[in-house]
């Protein structure tokens, strides 16, 4: 095998795609800043016990592990930034009241999430801490949609669920963790036969309610149907009421519900959402409430957020024009070099054409040219 061949699902990003990714990254961070979110930059590597605290088996299996040569302790390369941001909120900032944080950086996965996915996503996300009310959930949902719109993604669809519904139904069952994970997987796959098998020892009414969840997906009528089918529970009723409220405030996207959908990391504790777009084989953004995420760091408080992979987003984001630039001749003359420097200080992109390369193309659209006329360097349209 050639030494330059990269590992499976790892790839170089070439100029055209890199430009697209970087422009989207800047737009997403600017959008988060418009909402009042502060940028943080967690480290790529942490002690394993901190990195995986409270995140469940799924994140553990996705995490690359290594030994720190300085301390001898196990380290992990982050597969998700949310636990790190929760640690920052709990231990480094330790603010009272509401804290809004955003981040953008690479994460590493031991396995790709889908056959064509990268194992090195560029994860962007935003999180709000310290507010229990639905206002925070709605702000995060609205920010996620605005972020996708600024990335030129159209015809968005939001699919909503709530972790409390399944958690409430399973709470009274004394099941091992691997059994619960198998139930979650059967629900996500909408495999009613497998669910019945997994729940054969459960009370009949409870087992039937979980099986019925498989069919509870579609438009807003699903919520009314759920009230009729699911057991009476304050927690389930509250979840359904809040889902209806959130859906009623979504603007510029279609809304659907899938009450059996528990995809995502195990730390979700309330309303959840996935955002879909034409051309994407899976959700392009996921988010929701995870009030338990800071508990392991000694500071449990309300939290809600979302994240997305910018690399995956570029596949469905609208194409962007090349940046306009000025073509200039290469030369040592001081007046030419001064003219080029002045243009660059003004924010212009000036591409100097090296001798013998006048006809080459690149990632810039040179619509103007720096020319010498009557002893003065001036910019002319091409």
Image (cartoon, helix red, strand yellow):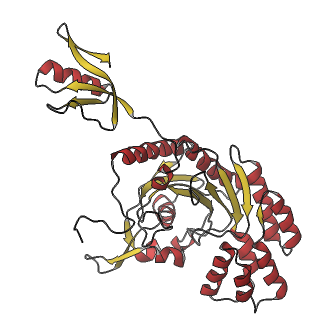
Q: Quadrant of the C terminus?
A: top left
Q: Nearer the viewer, residue 167 or 301?
A: 167
Q: Residue at x 74, y 61 (%)?
A: 257
Q: Nearer the viewer, residue 132 or 59?
A: 59
Residue 371 on image: x %, y %: 23, 16
Q: Quadrant of the N terminus?
A: bottom left
* Residue situated furthest right in the rendering: 228
* Residue situated furthest top in the rendering: 374
228 lies above or below 312: below
Residue 141 on image: x %, y %: 64, 52
Q: Is residue 332 left or right of residue 294?
A: left
Residue 191 on image: x %, y %: 70, 78
Q: Is residue 267 left or right of residue 229?
A: left
Q: Nearer the viewer, residue 12 or 70?
A: 12
Q: Residue at x 75, y 76 (%)?
A: 168
Report the label total.
0
Q: Residue at x 60, y 86 (%)?
A: 178
Q: Dividing the picture into quarters, in which one does residue 12 lie?
A: bottom left
Q: Residue at x 11, y 21 (%)?
A: 333
Q: Is residue 331 left or right of residue 70?
A: left
């Amino acid at each position: 095998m050639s030494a330059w061949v990269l590992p499976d699902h790892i790839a170089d990003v070439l100029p055209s795609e890199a430009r697209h990714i970087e422009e989207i990254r800047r737009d997403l961070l600017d959008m988060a800043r418009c909402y009042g979110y502060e940028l943080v930059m967690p480290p790529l590597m942490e002690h394993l016990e901190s990195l995986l605290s409270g995140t469940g088996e799924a994140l553990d299996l996705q995490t690359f592990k290594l030994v720190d040569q300085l301390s001898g302790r196990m380290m992990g390369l982050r597969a998700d930034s949310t636990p790190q941001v929760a640690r920052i909120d709990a231990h480094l900032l330790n603010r009272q009241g509401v804290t809004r944080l955003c981040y953008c950086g690479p994460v590493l996965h031991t396995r790709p999430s889908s056959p064509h996915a990268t194992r090195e996503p560029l994860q962007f996300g935003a999180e709000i801490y310290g507010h229990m009310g639905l206002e925070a959930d709605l702000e995060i949902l609205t920010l996620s949609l605005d972020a996708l719109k600024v990335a030129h993604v159209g015809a968005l669809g939001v699919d909503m669920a709530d972790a409390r519904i399944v958690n409430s139904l399973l709470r009274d069952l004394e099941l091992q963790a691997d059994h619960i994970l198998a139930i979650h997987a059967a629900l996500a796959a909408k495999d009613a036969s497998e669910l019945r098998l997994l729940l054969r020892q459960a009370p009949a009414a409870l087992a039937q309610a979980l099986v019925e969840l498989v069919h509870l997906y579609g438009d807003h009528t699903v919520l009314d149907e759920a009230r009729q089918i699911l057991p009476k529970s304050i927690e389930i009723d509250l979840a359904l009421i809040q889902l209806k409220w959130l859906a009623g405030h979504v603007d510029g996207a279609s809304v659907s519900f899938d009450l059996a959908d528990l995809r995502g990391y195990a730390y979700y504790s309330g309303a959840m959402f996935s955002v879909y777009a034409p051309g994407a084989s899976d959700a392009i953004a996921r988010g929701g409430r995870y009030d338990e995420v800071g508990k392991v760091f000694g500071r449990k408080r309300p939290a809600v957020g979302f994240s997305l992979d910018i690399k995956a987003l570029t596949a469905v984001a609208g194409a962007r024009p090349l940046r306009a630039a000025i073509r200039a001749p290469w030369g040592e003359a001081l007046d030419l070099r001064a003219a080029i420097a002045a243009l660059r200080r003004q924010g212009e992109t000036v591409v100097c054409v090296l001798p013998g390369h006048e006809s080459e193309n690149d990632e810039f659209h040179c619509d103007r040219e720096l020319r010498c006329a009557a002893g003065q360097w001036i910019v002319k349209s091409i």
